[in-house]
Amino acid sequence: MGFHDVIKNSVLEGFTSADISTVKMVVALGICLLISAYIYFVYRYVTRTTFYDRNFNVSMASISVIVTGIIIAMQSSLIISLGMVGALSIVRFRTAIKEPLDLLFLFWSIGTGIICGAGLYEVAVAVALVTTLGILFFQMIPISASPYLVVVNANDKGAETEIISIIKRYSPRYRIDSKNLRQSGMDLIVEIRSKNSNVLVDELSVVGGVSSVSLLYHDAPVKN
């Protein structure tokens, strides 16, 4: 048998269906479903988004089972594998993932489906436990101070000196993002990091010439 015959026989053997029993398929899908439910509850507990998207969570958990089915089908035949690759290559997802944490859970869900489809159930369980511990550990690390925007509306331009001195007292690191001078007064937007932001607002509100003070949470990174 020549070299070309060996290659030909190897390729033809790849097109033959693999022996994937019903028990193996049910076990893989069942274990994946349990881990997907675990991911569902972990996401529900960990997420801090203002508006919790239940549909996204359900879809994310279901992806694991679907991916497991795809991996099992790809193992059954080389023809199916090539067909799956071609079909998945034309899929386009246009939904933007706004939260980085959502992207982490989505990747975790897809990875779980691939691992369970390959039959590495111990690895899938270990990844689930380690990922959960990692998420909880990093979220428990306290930050020094939360970033805020202080919006001050004053009827007297001369109040700026006292306003800045009070801000310096509570937030040595601050930045004036906007300063709008009007004939009847001024508007200031200052970016701060302070653990006593509420006390700061109370002191600014009693400054002479200040008409209103607003405190807004700022989720963008603060520059040094």
Image: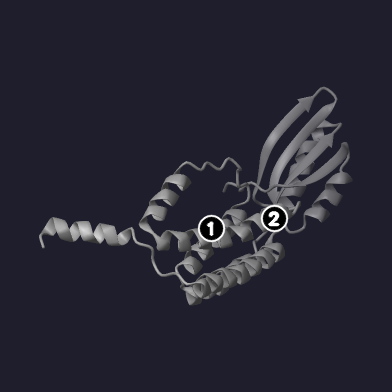
Where in the figure is residue 25, as x and y percent of width and height?
A: 52, 70
Applied colour scheme:
one colour
SS at mark 1?
Answer: helix
Disc 1 designates what residue?
107
Q: Nearer the viewer, residue 198 or 19?
A: 19
Q: Position of residue 145 (x, y in %)?
A: 68, 58
Residue name at image x 47 percent, y 41 percent: 90
Position of residue 32 relative to residue 202, above or below, is below
Looking at numbered disc 1 in the image, what kind of residue is underneath it?
Phe
- Closest to the camera, between mark 1 and mark 2, is 1
Mark on residue 146?
2
Residue drawn at 80 percent across, 33 percent down: 158
Q: Earlier in the sequence, mark 1 or mark 2?
A: 1
Counting the numbered discs, the total is: 2
Residue 117 seen in the current view? yes
Instruction: Residue 1 in the image: state x and y as whole percent.
Output: 11, 63
- Checking the image for residue 31, the label placed there is none
